[in-house]
Amino acid sequence: MSVVLSACNLRKSYGDQVVVDGLTVSIQRGECFGLLGPNGAGKTTTLRLMLGLIEPDAGELNLLDHPVPQQARAARLRVGVVPQMDNLDPDFTVTENLLVYGRYFGMSDKAIEARLPELLEFANLTHKRDAKVPTLSGGMKRRLTLARALVNDPEVLFLDEPTTGLDPQARHLIWQRLRELTARGKTLLLTTHFMDEAERLCHRLAVMDNGRIISEGSPRELIERNIEPQVVEVFGEQAAAWAQGHATRHAQRFEVSGETVFCYVDDAQPLLRELQQHPHLRYLHRPANLEDVFLKLTGREMRE
Amino acid sequence: MNRRHFAIPNISLRFVPIWRRNFMVWKKMAGSSILGHLADPVIYMLGLGYGLGGMLPEVGGMPYIAFLAAGTVCYSTMNSASFEALYSGFARMHEQRTWEAILNTPITLDDIVFSEIVWAASKSLLSGLAVLAVIWLLGLSHSPLTLWLIPLSLLVGLCFASLGLIVTALAPGYDFFMYYFTLVITPMVLLCGVFFPVDQLPPLLQTVSSILPLTHAINLARPLLNDVIPAHFLWHAAVLLGYALLGFYVSLVLFRKRLSQ
């Protein structure tokens, strides 16, 4: 497999604030790579650096065999971008948006028009082809943004929180489309703070916090490497008090968050037997997931 | 400030698709645009020209309405470019995030800023043509030299689009533009000989007037309408072009800084 995108020791500060702090990552052709992190972790800045829209203070970047930012223009010719905030042209219809955007890549109207049916179909917008953007739903706008990012048939797609603000139906449709793109061999780099999204879509993930990558691997590897395999969540007013007395005996580790105690264990059976002695406590036994890893690595406190 | 923000502008034909985009938007609203930016100055010119002109003897050696016509060509082209560069430019940069979408393609910020200037100047050209058409229709001038008002409209447009973009690059919001219109554009209209000859002003204000771009535009337009080749025409054109180039460079540096945040 060939490397499509590599960053080495990337740094970017705004004033005193270090936003990207020595980031090193490498993305292979055909993989879906997820950049996970809480708000303010530096995900969007990382994407902007990779596209050559801002200059790093230090470090090396290579996108599709072009050094960035020096040859960012040539690289962007073969890249598609789905931004975090919609920036479709509100004065235009669905097809006009695609046509105008294709021209920015130097495509002829004829070449763009030849791609329109496929793009509209992919975005489930064939029936809305002449609708103006303000009349579209949030999900339709996102799909149009995705289709727009594909107008130049890019090799790499950058997606910045592609499903934020969408309802579950709209989100599942986007996920399905993104899986189709990876099946076709496109390379995807997406940022998200939805763990289920990352777990479903990404071959490989990097958890990012305070401008650096703190763990990297497949979703399964991240879970195996960072956390005990079983989780028992215990709820109720007395859960915290119960935990102080009993949880340490049966759980490797536990965390209290409000009225919930999260117990992390290799074998849940002793803990479950113990919980049966306490009928006033409700509990949920489940395998550890990416969210557990994320919260362990980035902490439970709010990021504001 | 980053040294790279001061790099020489790198412009190319990549601005053309952005110009076409703006033209496509304009076509959808051409009716109100023509009424607002084109009919408005003509109404003023006719109202003041005939109303006020009826009470005046000749002004600057010509009927007042002919005197005013030259001022109106320059004034309306200035306004068209300024409004486009400020309000519409800011909407594309900030509110609609059109620039952000374009920057994700192989087009660069230098191309975008250049496209804004050329587009705003295109609207000036349209304004100039409309006023010129009225001048011809009313027989205010029969000189073939009036054809030179067409490239002049474009030049005035480039000049005020570039200057206006400096303000757009600095603006936190739309309210900011009121400072520019009230403190720069309105005094310019009164100081530069749109409504009355500059030699009516006290000497100090005449000096101020001589450095303002609109004065140089009117010093070209008025003789042309009067069938006279303007004195020092190369100098006046060079001043307008100088303002355009300076405005383009300064606004580009400011946009580079603003958008690198």
Image: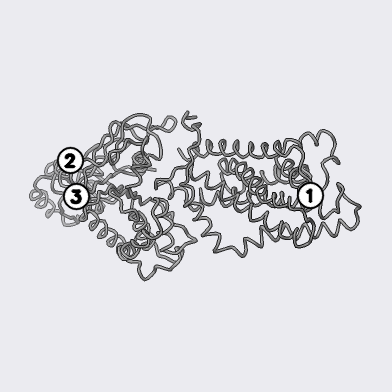
Residue B121 horizontal/vertical position (percent): 60, 49
Q: Secondary structure at mark 1?
A: loop
Could you tell which of marks 2 and 3 lies nearer the N-terminus? 2
Work out which quarter of the rendered image holds the N terminus of chain A and state it: top left
Q: Which residue is mark 2?
A: A226
**Badges 2 and 3: C-beta atoms under 8 Å apart?**
no
Location of mark 3 (residue): A289
Residue A246 visible in the displayed image: no
- Residue B258, can we see it? yes
Mark 2 Cα within 10 Å, few/some/many (few <14, many 20+)? Answer: some
Mark 1 residue type? Asp
User: Which of the numbered marks, if any, corresponds to residue A59?
Assistant: none
Q: Chain of mark 3?
A: A
Asked if the residue under mark 3 is in contact with the one under mark 1, i.e. CB atoms within 8 Å, the reply is: no
User: Type of residue at label 3?
Assistant: Asn
* x, y percent for residue A162: 33, 53
Tell me the residue that label 1 is attached to.
B227
User: Which chain is indicated by disc 2?
Assistant: A
The residue nearer to you, when weighing B93 against B250, is B250
Q: Secondary structure at mark 2?
A: helix
A224, B211: nearer the viewer: B211
Name the colouring of the figure. Answer: one colour
Q: Residue at x 11, y 52 (%)?
A: A272
Mark 3 secondary-structure assignment: loop
Tell me, yes or no, whether the two marked residues, 2 and 1, touch with CB atoms within 8 Å: no
- Same subunit, labels 2 and 3: the answer reads yes
- The quarter of the image holding the C terminus of chain A is top left
> Which chain is home to disc 1?
B
